Amino acid sequence: MTRLLLEIAADGIGSAFAAQRGGADRVELCADLAGGGVTPSRGTIAAARAGLTLPLHVLIRPRAGDFCYSQAEIRVMQYDIEECARLGCHGVVIGALDTAGDVDLAVCRSLIAAAGPMSITFHRAFDVVRDRQPALEALIGLGCERVLTSGAHSSAPEGAAAIAAVLRQAAGRIGVIAAAGVRPENVRQLVAATGVCEIHASASARRTSPASPRAAALRGLDADWRQTDPEAVRRLVDELRAAEALVSGPTRQ
């Protein structure tokens, strides 16, 4: 029976440790998940690496917005990847496109070279490429181990048919991770509909600040925040264990 893997998108150190407590298989560490995710600070990466026993992959994205990067931004990504290597991270999550909407092979090769032996995942830039079929072949040619996708829909359940098509094309040459809008109540159906062996979710809940007095809500100064909830992670894990009979295929950590 194939073991299904759960990767948690951890927005900060609290979420990373919550993912581990809940029984996740891997952490993708990031910052500003509400804005689509960017690279976390070096301190956050170092603290996560020191405190986690799970495989730690780090999102490499210098800013929100598109995936067409300037030379200065490319160098930032290279520096961040080199720092992840020095800290002993297990993998990085990258992505770059050209202005035509195709995978930017030159930029991706430079980032992969900086990564050395670390595992490479291509992030959801894949969902905005001009044509997913040649893009997937490009990722396979680059040597990426995984690709994150919602099937170019707002959520993985909505894009299930497209994710299944990506998995068929991949044919075991690259791992396919279903991402976006994955929850305990829909993950079994998603696995059945797509055949994926890896799931990506934030499993977050709103955390209420204990701070007092509380100021009126101001943009960017809200006292409350969202953080991965260990119980939500456990529920996802339980649902995946129940779904394992539905799929067969290789998994990668």
Image (cartoon, rainbow, N blue to C red):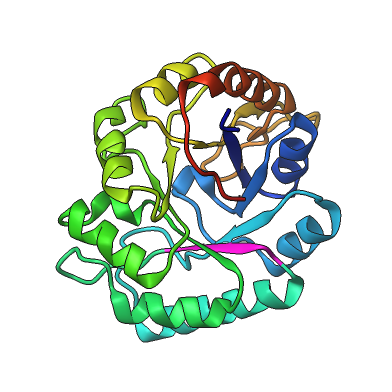
In the image: residue 246, left or right of residue 86? left
Residue sitting at 51 percent across and 42 percent down? 219
Q: Is residue 214 left or right of residue 3?
A: right
Q: Position of residue 168 (x, y in %)?
A: 28, 41
Give yes or no for residue 93 being in the magenta stretch: yes
Quarter that holds the N terminus = top right
In magenta, the rendered stretch is 89-94
Who's the residue at 29% across and 39% down the image? 151
As rendered, which of 27 and 37 lies closer to the eye?
27
Q: Residue at x 48, y 18 (%)?
A: 188
Q: Nearer the viewer, residue 88 or 133?
A: 133
Position in image of residue 196 (x %, y %): 43, 35
Q: Residue at x 58, y 53 (%)?
A: 31
- Rendered view: 199 above or below 146: above
The location of residue 169, given as percent across then percent down, is 26, 47
Residue 168, above or below 73: above
Q: Say whether residue 21 is magenta.
A: no
